[in-house]
Image (cartoon, rainbow, N blue to C red):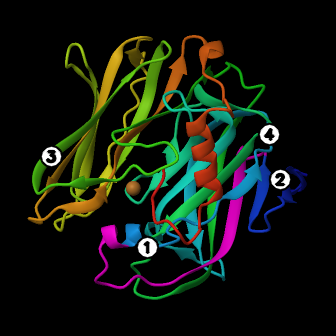
């Protein structure tokens, strides 16, 4: 009986893009997206990250799918397997970004980035007391960039993204929270990379918070030679949160910290109308400028005090149009930008 129930609870749906399938395992409370097959040529061993960034068609085309259940998203994990189903080192993914066409970001007139991993980030899971509200039928998508340093071509590999959810009848009801993206150098619909001069340097971006709420958890993203990213209050200079990078001896980034101030605590209170700044710091030992070699942002999960005040998508907004156009052009041959 139990086995039958498990089998019945897993239903496969093939959607319009034949490259992605969506499966629900209601026993494990997982939505499993499988994308592929992909052929990923080996990188030239002398290739630097910045060279890779400049390559045409750096990101894969957008892979669209529909979210299949009502409830809350509370975590995700990403794995890669070869044509025979054997695991492949996940570090062949430079980044993987999930987007939600049905919700806007808080700080940018751009569509929501709902999940994301970088080479240096670990899988994400928050306690069941928190969740991102999700409705059956939400239009999602994802894209990724490869960094195949294995020394050999990878043919027919597949990516598996497991999205953990809480069902809609979960009791007690989770606190509604939404992704919060804060980048030191983003042009919506354009890129967010910047040059890093030799030695120590910082780059910051100031913004005014549109709504009241609490930052419940956060991590971030940096490239090689990154030191950290912090969030500070502009008026007082007080550092409210920070992420730190762990680098290997050669300066390559291996890990980035994660904090959950909203678990066992109230989180970091951010106030509507108040100014904040996100600042990325780098220490470049190469003696030269790293051209477009860096990115720095904090990604968090934010509980607004009043959900109704969250900004809605305005399709007439030029930046929103640029954002949508850039997603639709992914995988083209005329750009090598790197969007998160
Ligand atoms: Cu990046």
Q: Decide whether residue 9 is among the magenta residues.
A: no
Residue at image position (82%, 40%) is 137
Q: Which mark is residue 55?
A: 1
Residue at image position (8%, 65%) is 287
Earlier sequence position, callout 1 versus callout 2: 2
Disc 2 element? helix
Q: What residue is disc 4 on? A: 69
Marks 1 and 4 sit apart, C-alpha to C-alpha, by 37 Å
Marks 2 and 4 sit apart, C-alpha to C-alpha, by 17 Å
Q: What residue is disc 2 on? A: 6
Asked whether, in this view, residue 262 is left or right of residue 230, the answer is right
Considering depth in this image, is 9 or 239 the residue closer to the camera? 239
Q: Which residues are magenta?
A: 26-51
Quarter holding residue 254:
bottom left
Mark 1 and mark 2 in contact? Answer it, CB < 8 Å. no
Quarter holding residue 209:
top left
Asked whether, in this view, residue 170 is left or right of residue 227, the answer is right
Q: What residue is disc 3 on? A: 201
């Amino acid at each position: 009986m139990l086995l039958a129930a498990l089998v019945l609870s897993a239903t496969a749906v093939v959607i319009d893009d034949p490259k992605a399938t969506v499966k629900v395992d209601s026993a494990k409370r997982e939505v499993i997206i499988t994308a592929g097959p992909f052929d990923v040529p080996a990188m030239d061993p002398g290739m630097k990250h910045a060279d890779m960034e400049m390559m045409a068609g750096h990101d894969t085309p957008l892979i669209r799918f529909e979210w299949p259940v009502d409830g809350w998203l509370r975590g995700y994990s990403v794995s890669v397997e070869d044509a025979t189903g054997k695991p492949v080192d996940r570090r062949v993914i430079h980044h993987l970004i999930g987007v939600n066409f049905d919700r806007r970001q808080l700080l940018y007139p751009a569509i929501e980035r709902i999940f994301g991993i970088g080479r240096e980030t670990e899988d994400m899971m928050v306690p069941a007391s928190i969740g991102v509200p999700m409705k059956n039928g939400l239009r999602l998508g994802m894209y990724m960039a490869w960094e195949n340093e294995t020394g050999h071509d990878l043919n027919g590999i597949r990516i598996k993204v497991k999205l953990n959810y809480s069902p809609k009848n979960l009791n007690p009801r989770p606190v509604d929270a939404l992704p919060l993206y804060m980048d030191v150098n983003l042009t919506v619909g354009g890129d967010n990379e910047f040059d890093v001069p030799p030695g120590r340097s910082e780059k910051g971006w100031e913004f005014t918070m549109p709504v009241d709420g609490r930052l419940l958890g956060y991590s971030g993203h940096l490239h090689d030679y990154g030191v950290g990213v912090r969030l500070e209050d502009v008026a007082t200079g007080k550092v409210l949160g920070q992420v730190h990078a762990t680098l290997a001896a050669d300066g390559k980034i291996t890990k980035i910290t994660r904090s959950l101030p909203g678990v066992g605590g109230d989180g970091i209170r951010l106030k509507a109308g108040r100014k904040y700044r996100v600042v990325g710091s780098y220490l470049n030992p190469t003696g030269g400028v790293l051209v477009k070699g860096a990115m720095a942002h904090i990604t968090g999960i934010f509980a607004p005090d009043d959900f109704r005040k969250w900004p809605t998508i305005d399709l007439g907004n030029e930046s929103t149009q640029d954002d949508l156009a850039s997603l639709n052009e992914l995988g083209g041959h005329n750009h090598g930008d790197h969007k998160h």
